[in-house]
Image: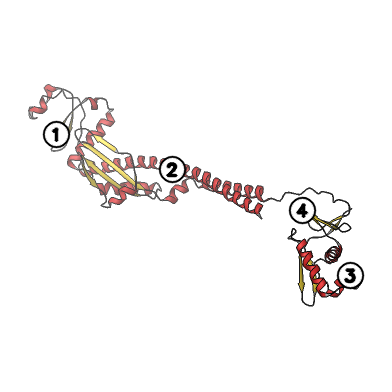
Amino acid sequence: MKDIHNKKILFISLIICISFIEGLIINKNYKTTEKKTLKEIEQLFNKSIQINKYIREKEKPFFKIYMPLPKDSISKSFPSNIQIKQSSHIIKHSTDTTILIEKTEKLKSMVEDEKRYITEQMYLAKINPIRPFRLDSIFSETLHQNHIPAQTAVIYGIDGIKHYSTSDSSFYVSASKLEDVVIELDHKIVLQGYVKLPFIYIIRQSISFYIGGLGIWLLLIGITAWLIFRKKKKKEVPLPDGFIAITDDIIFHEKDGILKYKEGDEIILTTYKLKLFTLLLNEIGHFIPVDIIKDTVWADGMSTKDALVQAIRRLRNELEPFPELRIENARDKGYRLLIGNKVIKESQ
């Protein structure tokens, strides 16, 4: 029993270790998948900003020219503080407004498309600024078109003043924050996207990995259980001469009255106890009437009921080192020896 208990403790310990390692691997894969998904969402957020810009341009159409403007060609109608700036500028025209922006070192380092995008966003920020709720709606729709069932929110900040697409402040705390989109020239625009991805969506991105991991976990548990609880085939050891096997571990020599474990304790039965044990052993599991016991054990007829009771008591005491062997009695039936369902085998 102690050996079985130790095996159970070992088995449970190994299950915990295997499960812990499997959990670490699954957690790492989950984090990697989530990070990859957020990178894809960041690209879609930038796409949503582009769509929003296009819509705002349609609402407030304007004509744009990007060109170097020498100092001597600046119109006298411009304020003097603009006229004294460096000779390289970007000029933008709308139907009723002309905006002159100094061409700084930062602008000089940009490619033309980037210059155009930034100056257009600066201009739109003045005539048709971003509305966070609409950008959030565009962002959410873009995600759903790409089969990403995420909840979204947006923060639009300009020159340090923030505008929120939702008043639920707890959402911004619990959601995943995307990398800031910063547009900066004469103003600083910061666009922040927030998303909440369903747990099951992340799992589905690597479903084959999790199914494989579960299969490996079950396989390892099965192999561990087999290695721990498998019954090792015992090597057959020949019985000593004159002995019979009562169980796998207990042997008996009737002539010498030796009852012993193959490896361990032994006792020597004598006189009435030997005869009584041999009689009960020959009828394993069957009740033997009291009269038959008395006639067999005390063939001279010199027996009493008390003598039989005393003999049974002494034999039980002798058998205490062998808990597998039990003597039972029943009224009007007699006595019997119980040894489970073991088969007695004679030595060759």
Disc count in the image?
4
User: Residue sitting at 13 percent across and 36 percent down?
Assistant: 97
Cα distance between the residues tagged 2 and 3: 82 Å
- Within 10 Å of disc 4 (Cα), the crowding (few <14, some 14-19, many 20+) is few
Give the amino acid type for the residue marked by disc 4 in the picture.
Asp
Q: Earlier in the sequence, mark 2 or mark 3?
A: 2
Question: Which residue is at the far bottom?
Answer: 332
Q: In this view, does 163 lie to the left or right of 81?
A: right
According to the picture, the residue beneath numbered tag 3 turns out to be 296
User: Residue sitting at 79 percent across and 57 percent down?
Assistant: 247
Q: Is mark 3 on a helix, strand or loop?
A: helix
Q: What element carries label 2?
A: helix
The answer to whether 138 is drawn above or below residue 296 in the figure is above
Cα distance between the residues tagged 1 and 3: 132 Å
Residue 142 pos. (x, y %): 35, 46
Q: Is residue 167 left or right of residue 230?
A: left
Q: Earlier in the sequence, mark 3 or mark 4?
A: 4
Residue 222 pos. (x, y %): 62, 49
According to the picture, the residue beneath numbered tag 4 turns out to be 265
Q: What element carries label 4?
A: loop
Cα distance between the residues tagged 1 and 2: 50 Å
- Marking on residue 31: 2
Residue 287 visible from this viewpoint: no
Q: Which of marks 4 and 2 is nearer the N terminus?
A: 2
According to the picture, the residue beneath numbered tag 1 turns out to be 98
The answer to whether 75 is drawn above or below residue 203 in the figure is above
Give the amino acid type for the residue marked by disc 3 in the picture.
Thr
Image quadrant in which you'd find residue 86: top left
